[in-house]
Image (tube, rainbow, N blue to C red):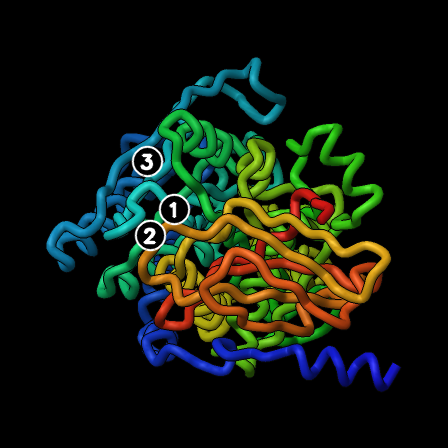
Amino acid sequence: MKIQLSLILIFSFVLVSGQTDTRIYDITNRISAERIEKDIRTLAGFGTRNTFSDTVSETRGIGAARRWIKNEFDKISEGCNGCLDVFYQKDLVTPGDGSRIPHKAWVVNVVAVQKGSRYPNRYIIMSGDIDSRASDATDFTTDAPGANDNASGMAGTIEAARVLSGYRFESSIVYVGLSGEEQGLFGGQGLAEYAREHQWDIVGIFNNDMIGNIEGVDGIIDNRTFRIFSEPVPPTETEEQRKRRRFYGGEVDGISRQLARYIHKTVKTYMPEMNPMMVYRLDRFGRGGHHRPFNDLGYAGVRIMEAHENYNRQHQDIRTENGIAYGDVVAGVNFGYARKLTAVNAINLAALAWAPPAPARVAIGGGVEAAVKLQWDKVDDPDVKGYIIYWRYTTSPQWEFSRFVGDTDHFTLEGVVVDNFYFGVAAVGKDGHESVVVFPSETFRN
């Protein structure tokens, strides 16, 4: 074992991972807890943001909230010489669409697109939910401030737009407020279908749903740990892909899981004080979030959220019973923690938007020999410095070993047995930013 590990470490030549981009630290420092607090208080101040609440009032209801969000995106765009394309995307829902729909209504998303300079049709998305709910999801009149669920995620998305709009990126970044989450993920479904119709090349979506609570109902107080939920493999995989996976592995290596690993690595590099917790689930047990509609269409997507939930503050009418305070009010939000998770999003949006696209295809071979052969399609980008091969033991949650192999489309790892590891390939830009790792999708024989 020691000899084998030594061989692995010799081959593990991490040329790029030791480099950091000081712009990423600047982005982290520019995220403001004070601005996030102000936005959360504003959103909570609309009384209720239930999807079916008032759309006419300027001070109460979902209509006032979404107009305020659009106005914030418009102001950000004015500050960056029109760098954001801001628009509404909407779909009509009726009672026949689900049990949580009391009457027909428009589910309206607020979208702000920061176009990339080289890959304008390549998108990385950050989302927060506009809507809130009381104990009864169909009750659209009772106060439901939704301070943490999900004014925190929406405020974080607006703040990320404020900071990142000051930079130029090769790929496009989308900041979006999604509606209809509490009634059946309708907003995410609408935008995912819009993206497919407009042939968006989506790298991934970061769904932020509750990023402000540090006091768990389990008694734990933790302002550093957060969860990244990701499904193992896409639901759109073919029967042939499933059969290959049975023999070659990859049960935990789908595109959403690779996106989660990317986030984990970026955070450990640039925010080592944080504790990213990868959860091998699509979402919380038996529950759902707005990344799922994107997953359903085959796009990569994860949920980023607090580690310790407080169910007394979720989906509850504001009240006190037996000395216990219920309700999702501003007092339950830790703005410093929301700032940290907003920074988690912002630095990963930036890293991916500055990185080259990932190789479109990776193939692997090397059975019954001590050499692993990898081939991939090179990325058509003059700023690609080369490619990096990652590998790990099959029981490891993270990539453990790596080797930068230069500007080539193939490489052989001598002395490594393919049976004992999983492998992947990422493209590396001249500034050191890497694409998401691509797991081999096919095998070959020499």
In the image, is 238 to the left or to the right of 148?
A: right
Q: Nearer the viewer, residue 238 or 165?
A: 238
Q: Quadrant of the N terminus?
A: bottom right
Quick check: can you spot residue 36? yes
Callout 1 amino acid: Tyr
- Regarding mark 3 in the picture, which secondary structure is present there? helix
Callout 2 amino acid: Ser
Among numbered discs 2 and 1, the one appearing first in the sequence: 1
Q: Residue at x 73, y 65 (%)?
A: 397
Rate crowding at label 2 as few (under 14), some (14 to 19) or many (20 or more) other CA atoms within 10 Å.
Answer: many
* CA separation in Å, label 2 and label 1: 6 Å
Rate crowding at label 3 as few (under 14), some (14 to 19) or many (20 or more) other CA atoms within 10 Å.
Answer: many
* CA separation in Å, label 3 and label 1: 27 Å
Q: Nearer the viewer, residue 413 or 215?
A: 413
Image location of residue 415, percent across then percent down: 76, 72
Instruction: Tell me whether circle 2 and circle 1 mark residues in contact (CB < 8 Å).
Output: yes
Q: Residue furthest right?
A: 1
Residue assigned mark 2: 171
Residue assigned mark 3: 63
Q: Residue at x 53, y 60 (%)?
A: 426
Q: Is residue 376 above or below residue 418?
A: above
Among numbered discs 3 and 1, the one appearing first in the sequence: 3
Q: Residue at x 60, y 48 (%)?
A: 255
Quick check: can you spot residue 329? no
Q: Is residue 371 above or below residue 23?
A: above
Q: Nearer the viewer, residue 314 or 398?
A: 398
Q: Residue at x 79, y 49 (%)?
A: 249
Residue assigned mark 1: 123
Callout 3 amino acid: Gly
In the image, is 419 to the left or to the right of 85?
A: right
